[in-house]
Structures are given as structure tokens and as C-alpha cells.
Image (spheres, rainbow, N blue to C red):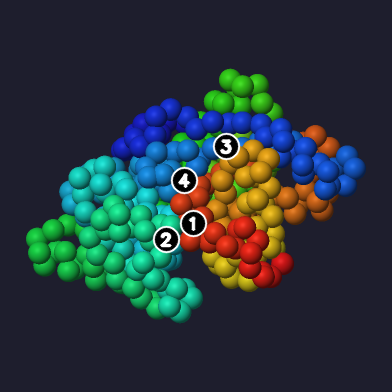
Amino acid sequence: MDLSRFPRRRYTQGATPLEFLPHFTKALRATCLEGKSPNVWIKRDDMLGLTPGGNKTRKLEFLVADALAKGADTLITCGAPQSNHCRATLSASIKEGMKCRFVIEERLPHSYREDASGNNFLFRLMGVEAITVVPAGTNMLEAMQKVAGDLAKEGRKGYIVPGGGSNAIGGLGYVACAQELQQQFFEQGVQIDKIVVGSGSSGTHGGLLAGFLGNHIHIPIIGIGVSRDPADQDPLVHQEAQAVADLLGLGITVPREAVVSHGDWWRPKYSVPNQAMVEAVQMLARTEAILLDPVYTGKIMAGLIGLARKGVFGKDENVLFIHTGGASSLHAYEAEVLGLKELSA
Ligand SMILES: *Cc1c(COP(=O)(O)O)cnc(C)c1O
């Protein structure tokens, strides 16, 4: 499939590694039913470019190219207080010599603290131009449009990057990832049986699915919800995959049954730690020296571990975990991930 017709900036050199996780696979096997434990592989999208990488980098390559084509001088986006997406967007704006403004939604009251560690610290270090903090439930698009209006009054031009970078253009980033994976499977002689990926604002899950359909890759994709149960999440992913497929001109209807997600690992709330996340973060750090994060990848890996223990994967199936990044928020949750705080299961 030809992606070269879509404008794209490059923030990463080459492909991110596709690797087998030998020690993690062995540790997981010791806790699974006999003969039901998968071989776990990882796609290191935490090693993408920008400061540091993660899945938002792939989406921003296409979104920022669009912003530049439209003559924008400022990127406007939104997210939660520890948003990786805001941090990556700020980083892209700096690389392009643009300015950047955020609207931060306090999904938990008083959860935004200017002096917080993790991504908040990076917002300040990299010099975000302005942050508007709004309460949970605010219409984020309207809030960002207001910022764009303020800029227009000064003769500037803002470009609104949607939450998580998840629209049809952003989803192209994960179509590019699907093509990168296809090439790596071929070159490395790897046969993957199932893929586990995080499912939030849905550009990653939906974009990957559209990319698989467009490239005739028939590996099932299992989404792990980070903020919603399947009844709410799956329609979002389906809509995103369809929008990306339409932008690509695939001329297909995305089959509803191709969208699969699980909602058992995100509670008690989006971004609030749980015990299964702590186990996953510690396990990958201690077996492979790879850092997950408390908000997304820790819960997503907890999903992979949980599904493995339920016997969902066949013996020696090759399961690929897409590492979508996020470790820069770890320092805002040190006591939690070290197991020093009482958490829900
Ligand atoms: C944003 C994010 C996700 C979720 O990806 P979506 O495309 O929003 O579904 C997963 N992992 C990390 C680390 C993220 O920052």
C-alpha cells in the first residue's frame, strides 16, 4: 500500500526493534497453566523519536505535516495531567520551530499540579507556551477552538491536534507501523499469532487494524482498554479504523468482529494505579530491563499476563506486545510502582 502520497515528517530513524523476550516468557510460563503459555515478543515503539518516543510520535509525523501544509505556527492539543500525547506534541513543535499550547482536563479533581514530576515537569522544561486547565467533562474541542481564536486575534495560526492524535490522519501512523511490522516479520522470519495493543483514544488500535486490512495481514489484534469497557471502546475503535480505511481509499467496510478489546485491567479508573499494573511493571523491569508506565503500558501488559493465565493463548503461540511508551510518567508514581502503597486489585 502506498503511503507516500500523504505528507509526513520523520521523527525516528529507521524501524523500532522487534524482539523476543526470553526471560519474561520464562517467568510468565512459571505462572501459567501447563502448556498454555505464549512466547512473548515486543515491538519497541517506546524507542520512537521525540522526547522520548511512544505511539504519539507515529501519529504526529502525519498530523504535524498537515499542520505545516496548512501554514500553522502553533500546535494546540489536549490531554490528562500526565499526558504523554501533550509532551510528544510539545516536542514535535520544538523540532519544527513552532509554539505549543495545551488544554489539560482534570479527570480527577485537583489532579493537575504545576510542580508535579513526570510529563508535567517536561512540559515546563521544554517550555510549553500556555496551559489552560479545565474540569472533567469539558468539551475539549471547544476549549481548543477558543485557544485557536485567541491566537488568531494576534495574527497567529493554531492547528488543533485532537486528543491522543486520534483521527484519520493520525491513524496513518499505525498504518505505517503495520507496514514496518510486515517487513520485519518477513526479514526476521518471525510468525506472530496474536498482537496485544493498548486501546485508549483508539488511533493506535484502529490505525493498526486498518493497516492490517489494507495489507492483507491476518493476525488477530487484541486491544486492552485503558479507560473503557468493550461496549464503549469497540465502537470508537471501529469508527477510527473505518475513517483511516476511507482516507486510504481501501473501499472496504471494516468488519465489526475484527475489533476486539478487553476491559478487565483499567480499573479503578483511567490513570489510577492497580495491583496488576504494578506486577506487570515490576516483572518487565526485572526480567528484561524494559520500562513500562503506570497509566497505559503497565495495565496493557497486565492484560497480556492475565489473558495468558486464563489460558487464552495456545502452547508456544507467538504473542506480540506493542510497547506504546509512556515511561516518562513513571517518576510521578514511584511509590505506587515500587509496591509501597495499598492499591486495588
Ligand atoms: C496514548 C497512549 C496509549 C493509547 O493509545 P491510543 O492511540 O490513544 O489508543 C497507549 N500507551 C501509551 C503510553 C500512550 O501514551
- Residue under label 2: 117
Towards the viewer: 325 or 329: 329
Q: Which of marks 2 and 3 is nearer the N terminus?
A: 3
Q: Distance between the residues labelled 1 and 2?
A: 6 Å
The kind of secondary structure element at disc 4 is loop
Identified at 83% across, 48% down, the residue is 31
Q: Which amino acid does label 2 sit on?
A: Ser
Q: Which amino acid does label 3 sit on?
A: Lys
Q: Do the residues labelled 1 and 2 touch (CB within 8 Å)?
A: yes
Q: Which amino acid does label 1 sit on?
A: His
Identified at 56% across, 46% down, the residue is 291
Towards the viewer: 66 or 198: 198
- Residue under label 3: 43
The kind of secondary structure element at disc 1 is helix
- Residue under label 4: 54
Would you say the beta carbon of the disc 4 residue lies within 8 angstroms of ligand 1? yes
Single out the mark in the foreground, 4 or 1: 1
Q: Distance between the residues labelled 4 and 2?
A: 18 Å
- Residue under label 1: 331
Q: Do the residues labelled 1 and 3 touch (CB within 8 Å)?
A: no
Single out the mark in the foreground, 2 or 3: 2
Single out the mark in the foreground, 1 or 3: 1
Q: How far apart are marks 4 and 1 (CA)?
A: 17 Å
Question: For the residue carrying disc 1, how many other residues have a C-alpha within 10 Å: few (<14), some (14-19), or many (20+)?
Answer: some
Q: Are marks 4 and 2 in contact (CB under 8 Å)?
A: no
Q: Do the residues labelled 4 and 1 touch (CB within 8 Å)?
A: no
One can see residue 345 in this view: yes
Q: What residue type is labelled 4?
A: Gly
